[in-house]
Image: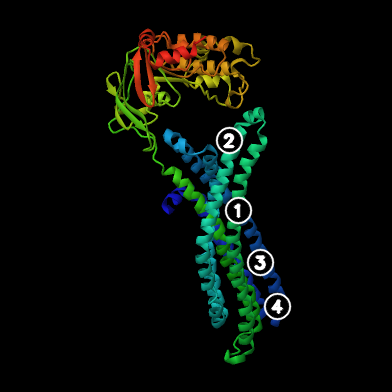
Amino acid sequence: MLKRFLSYYKPHKFIFTMDMLASLVMSLIGITYPIITRYMLNELFPERKYKLLVILGIALLALYIIRMLLQFFIQYYGHVMGVRMQAQMRSDMFNHLEKLPYKFYDNNETGKIMSRMTNDLMDISELAHHGPENLIISSISIVISFVYLCTINLPLTLILFTCVPFLLIISMVLRKKMRAAFKKSRQSVAEINASLESSISGIRVTKAFGNAEKESEKFEVGNKKFVSARREAYKAMGQFHSMTSFVTDIFNVVLLIAGGLILFGAAGFGGDMEFGDYSAFVVSIGVFISPVLTLINFMEQFQNGVTGFERFIEIMDTPPEQDHAGATDAGVLDGEIEFRNVTHAYDDSKEVIKNISLKIGKGEKFALVGPSGGGKTTICHLIPAFYDISDGEILIDGRDIRTMTRASLRKNIGIVQQDIYLFNSSIKDNILYGRLDATDEEVVEAAKRANIHDYIMTLPEGYDTQIGERGVKLSGGQKQRLSIARVFLKNPPILILDEATSALDNATEILIQDALDELCHGRTTIVVAHRLSTIKNADEIAVISEGRVLEKGTHEQLMERGGMYAGLYAQQFRQ
């Protein structure tokens, strides 16, 4: 993990080196004050060398000005480096998320993923900036100040240094507890973000059903978990800081007692220490303790950063969606589809598709009907390889889809679903999503074929009109026609219509159906429909229930058999 973290420093070697040098010079400047203080007390004051006293004071002021500039450099460029590293991690995570399979998003909430990309990476950024500075420079400062203290009085320095192991022991004992507490705290923040994202996205449904109080109750469950997790984290942090502060306070007690005994030669310590040395030692001990405290306090930031990076690595180590070995470009497909004894289950659970065999000819319209949860949508998801099948084969043009790269396979497939997702952008940008290199003329032509062009032209900004989050400014029919325009622009040989009109009223459905009929022309089309009137003219209909094909045939053949299809049809049109 450390090697992966350090790899993000590589593009910023120069800034990192300058930041470390600036921190080192600041540490060296910090030790000059006790050195000058000792020299003044032992040499200048007794001999009344006022001129040299002023010169040293001015020199010290000049050093402090330099330290001020170095401090600005560290705070500014150091944080810029951290932000750039954070941005790179965010880009890496986003690009990796784009490659993850459907299964990952089935099992992970959007809000929790967003929390990892924002809150966690912010803490990693702070660790990236302050981590090396605190670890390396503070360690150097401790060594330099320790050596200098030894030159003043070795026995007193060694006595004080015996307190350091207690600090290390306490840090190691409490660090593990603190780390676990902060990890739990991060998980609770992710749960709140997930709950918030869900509630805000569904605010219109909440208002429609008057369930604001219920949403508040659900949110408060996560909120209370957050408070509890943070309480534990702060408790661990409080124990850590209180104990370490107590040990550092002991330094002052030891310095007062041992230093006084050595200064006055009491109890056999020997009086070989001058008052100027003792005063300089008192000043210098702050230079020694300060980086020790910095390292101790750094533990909290370290735990935050490490926990965040672990959560970042969890996502980055999730295996991406990959092509099968030897997969090649599918090219332009004709659209003949065959399922051979296909079985599929999600995450080793109950089989959703059970030994299904289907054959769909090029340019045919093939309909899937049956009860909800029977496996119709799963069949549609298997054709573009959104999921890998558990057993069997799916062939297109006689070729197993596993021998095709997923990207090239999906270029040949257009999908129109019931739940349309539109981006918070312009109408033009949303249509262009079908083929990003299309011209304006091609976009307009696609809109005309989807029966949405005339409506677009009534808008003040036409194709540049912003449609809001998830197309909130459009009606259901308008959103559906935009999604159809996308597919017209993509112009794939295979089309999947997954209950594309089931959420629309009858008048809108008629308008949309005209566009869909135009879209289906000349393409191999798989239609999932509950309204059986829309698929009466299909070349073949398959009834799917409990993951199996119960019956197949044309509308007339299935009606003659008097099976499940005939029963469903009679139920819909019993009047």
Q: Nearer the viewer, residue 206 or 548?
A: 548
User: Residue visible at 28% across and 33% down?
Assistant: 325
Residue 254 visible, this angle = yes
Q: CA distance from mark 4 to mark 3?
A: 17 Å
- Whether tag 2 and tag 3 are in contact, CB under 8 A, the answer is no
- State the residue position of label 3: 60
- State the residue position of label 2: 198
Mark nearest the camera among 4 and 3 is: 3
Mark 1 residue type: Ser
Q: Earlier in the sequence, mark 2 or mark 4?
A: 4
Q: Secondary structure at mark 2?
A: helix
Q: Residues within 10 Å of mark 2 (few under 14, many from 20)?
A: some
Residue 228 circle label = 1
Mark nearest the camera among 4 and 1 is: 1
Q: Earlier in the sequence, mark 3 or mark 1?
A: 3
Q: Answer with the quarter of the image where residue 381 lies.
A: top left
Q: Answer with the quarter of the image where residue 284 lies.
A: bottom right
Q: CA distance from mark 2 to mark 3?
A: 59 Å
Q: CA distance from mark 1 to mark 2?
A: 22 Å
Relative height, residue 432 to residue 363 (above, below): below
Q: CA distance from mark 2 to mark 4?
A: 75 Å
Colour pattern of the rendering = rainbow
Q: Nearer the viewer, residue 30 or 104?
A: 104
Question: Residue 560: horizontal and vertical position, in percent?
Answer: 36, 8
Mark nearest the camera among 2 and 4 is: 2
Q: CA distance from mark 3 to mark 1?
A: 50 Å
